[in-house]
Amino acid sequence: KTNFNIAVLPGDGIGPEVVDESIKILNAIAEAFRYKFDFTYGLMGAEAIYKTGKPLPDETLAICRASDAVLFGAIGDPSFDNNPDAKVRPEQGLLKLRKELGLFANIRPLKIYSSLIDKSPLKKEIIDGTDILIFRELVSGIYFGEKFTDEEAGYAYDNCRYHRDEIVPVVHMAFQEAQKRRKKVTLIDKANVLDTSRLWRKICKEIAAGYPEVELDFMFVDNAAMQLILNPKQFDVIVTENMFGDIISDEASVIGGSIGLLPSASIGADNALFEPIHGSYPQAKGKGIANPIASVLSTAMMLDYLKLDQAAEKLRQSVEHAVDNRYVTADLNNQQPYSTAEVGSFIADYIMYSEKSYYN
Ligand code: IPM
Ligand code: MN
C-alpha cells in the first residue's frame, strides 16, 4: 500500500503549529519515497466547542473512522480550566475519541539524546542510557468509570473498574514489544490497596507464562515514582492502568530534558492516533517557539504503524540530525533558537536531500 488517508486534528494552543510541521515533513516523505498522503482535517477540542458546541463533532469522528491513521495536535484551553462550571470541556473530546475508536493502548517511548543530556534536571550518570517504553491502558479504569457529584451534600465519586478483557490486550502488546527489547516488563500498580491492581497482577502473571524469555516484575506506583528518578535505567517496558500511566508518563517525560521531544501512539484494533505527549501550551500559541519534534516523532510512530519502515527510520535519523546540530527550538537551545517552522523545514529538507530514491 502506498496511498494513505490521514485524519488531521490540529486541536488547541500550539497543536496547529506543530501539526503543520508534521504535514510539511509527510509531504517531503511522500515525495522522497513516492507515497501519497491525503489529509482530511477535523475540528476537535476548544476549537470545536467554539465552532460547533461539541468537543468532538460527529463529522470529526467519521473522518477518523474512515482514516488509516489520525494525527492529533493538542487539546486544552485555559478559559475552560479556570471555569469549574463549564458543562463541556475540550478534554472530553479526546476521551470520547479514544473510547469510540477503541484505542486501548497508549505507547510512550522515552529515549535520551546524548547531545541533550545536559538539559535533563537529573544527573548525567543517572540518565545516560535510559530507554523506557510505557504502555498505558487508555479506555477504562477511573477515567471511564461511573462518576457522580452531589453538590449539596458535598459528595462525589469516580469509580475505578477493570474487566479482564480490558487488561489482556495491552499486556500482550507490552510483552510482545519486550521480546524485541531487553525482555523485561514491569507492572506498575497499587496491589497492596486496590482490587483492580490485584486483578492486573493476576492477569499479568498468566500472560507472562506465554512469554518465558521475558521477565515480569511488579512495582507499587508510589515506589515507581521514586525509582523513575533514582534509577530510570532499571526499566525496560512498563505496563500500567490508565491513571497511573497518565501520571508516571509525565514524570518520565522530563527525564530526557524536554517534554517537547516525546511522542505517543494510541492503538486500537481498527484505528490509531498519534500525538505529542505535551499539552496545548497556550502561552506559546502563535509565537512560533513551540518544539515540533514531539509531533514529528509521533508522525514517525505513525509511519511504523503504517508499515513504512524505511520512511520511519529516515525520519528519526533526520530528527537526530537536527538535534545533534542544535537545530532546535528555544527549549533546547536558548543561545540560538530556531522557530517551529525552521526546525520543521530543516528536517523536511534533510529528508529530501539525503534520500537517494528521490534522485532515482
Ligand atoms: C494525556 C492527557 C489527557 C489524559 C487529558 C488531556 C484528558 O493528560 O493524554 O495524557 O489525562 O489522558
Ligand atoms: Mn497526561
Image (tube, rainbow, N blue to C red):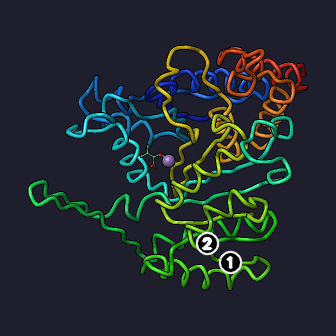
Camera-nearest residue between 333 and 71: 333
Residue 48, placed above or below residue 242: above
- The residue drawn where x is 64% and y is 42% is 263
Q: Mark 1 points at which residue?
A: 217
Three-letter amino acid code of the residue under disc 2 = Leu
Circle 2 packing at 10 Å, graded few (<14), some (14-19), many (20+), is: many
Q: Quadrant of the N terminus?
A: top right
- Mark 2 and mark 1 in contact? Answer it, CB < 8 Å: yes
Helix, strand or loop under label 1: strand
Quadrant of the rendered image containing residue 141: bottom left
Quadrant of the rendered image containing residue 289: top right
First in residue order: circle 2 vs circle 1: 2
Camera-nearest residue between 263 and 186: 186
Q: Quadrant of the C terminus?
A: top right
Helix, strand or loop under label 2: strand
> Residue 304 placed where, x, y %?
70, 46
Q: Is residue 160 left or right of residue 156?
A: right
Q: In this view, does 264 lie to the left or right of 70?
A: right
- The residue drawn where x is 84% and y is 47% is 124
- The residue drawn where x is 65% and y is 19% is 340
> Residue 152 placed where, x, y %?
8, 56
Camera-nearest residue between 173 and 235: 235
The mark found on residue 104 in the picture is none
> Residue 55 placed where, x, y %?
32, 36
Q: Looking at this view, name the residue that lies furthest to the left.
A: 152
The mark found on residue 187 in the picture is 2
> Residue 339 placed where, x, y %?
67, 15
Q: Does the residue labelled 2 lie within 8 Å of ligand 1?
A: no
Circle 1 packing at 10 Å, graded few (<14), some (14-19), many (20+), is: some
- The residue drawn where x is 28% and y is 23% is 51
Q: In this view, does 7 lie to the left or right of 227?
A: left
